[in-house]
Amino acid sequence: MKHLVLIFTLMASPAAAYDICDELWFIRNLTFDRAGYCFGSTLGQALFDNANCVTKNPTLSRDAQATVAKLGEMEDWMGCDVDTSQRYLDLPNEGFLRQLQDLPVPTDTGSGCIGWRGPDVPLRAGHDMSAPILSVGRAGANIIWNYDWVDAPGWEFLSVTRDGVLIGMGWSNSYIDPELCTQLAG
């Protein structure tokens, strides 16, 4: 069984190490939670509380179906087996993920622009110009590509770090010119 721990060396922080299987499970189940799913597992109830649940068989939008399918493929490929009898997942980016309207799919690889020297890069909750801006990648930050998306032409999902700390995540349609990076990684 493949079981990988993803370490974001681009973020240069020991606290940035986490189990990608936990994140895949969380994002997949966050999608179901938003559709009104009623969780039966200890972990599902602890993270999503069932306060607004209405069904064990929610109807997902086409985009949500595609995201769930891609997340499931990644979980299968990586041999994930999250212990749903626990009450907690160590996800350093959980708060950021909960703010998103459109959910990304984590990858087991990453690349980045170390030392961004360009203009501000707005990071939005969704892959739409009307989505709220959650954070901004500014000069001096590291811009990291470590998520995939299902169908968002012209948009990328980015993580932004500064001094080894995750300071933002979100969708961007800004062009990240490699010439404006101090160095490239990945």
Image (cartoon, rainbow, N blue to C red):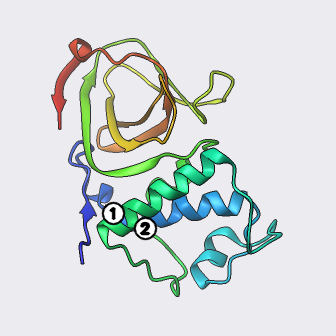
> For the point 46% across and 41% down, which residue is it?
149
Q: Which amino acid does label 2 sit on?
A: Asp
Query: Residue at 54% of width from left, 61% of height from top?
Result: 28
Residue 37, how many percent across, how many down? 73, 68
The circle drawn on residue 22 is 2
Quadrant of res 174: top left
Residue 88 x %, y %: 51, 75
Secondary structure state at the residue bearing disc 2:
helix
The reply to whether discs 2 and 1 touch (Cβ–Cβ < 8 Å) is yes
Q: Mark 1 points at which residue?
A: 18
The Cα–Cα distance between marks 2 and 1, rounded to whole angstroms, is 8 Å
Q: Residues within 10 Å of mark 1 (few under 14, many from 20)?
A: some
Secondary structure, mark 1, is strand
Q: 28 left or right of 148?
A: right
Q: Give x and y (percent) for residue 78.
A: 30, 67
Question: Residue 84, relative to residue 8: is it above or below?
Answer: below
**90 above or below 182?**
below
Q: Residue 152 carries which label?
A: none
Q: Which residue is found at the position 60% from the left and 42% from the top?
A: 102
Residue ID at (47%, 38%): 168
* Nearer the observer, 109 or 179: 109
Instruction: Classify residue 141 as left or right of residue 25.
Output: left
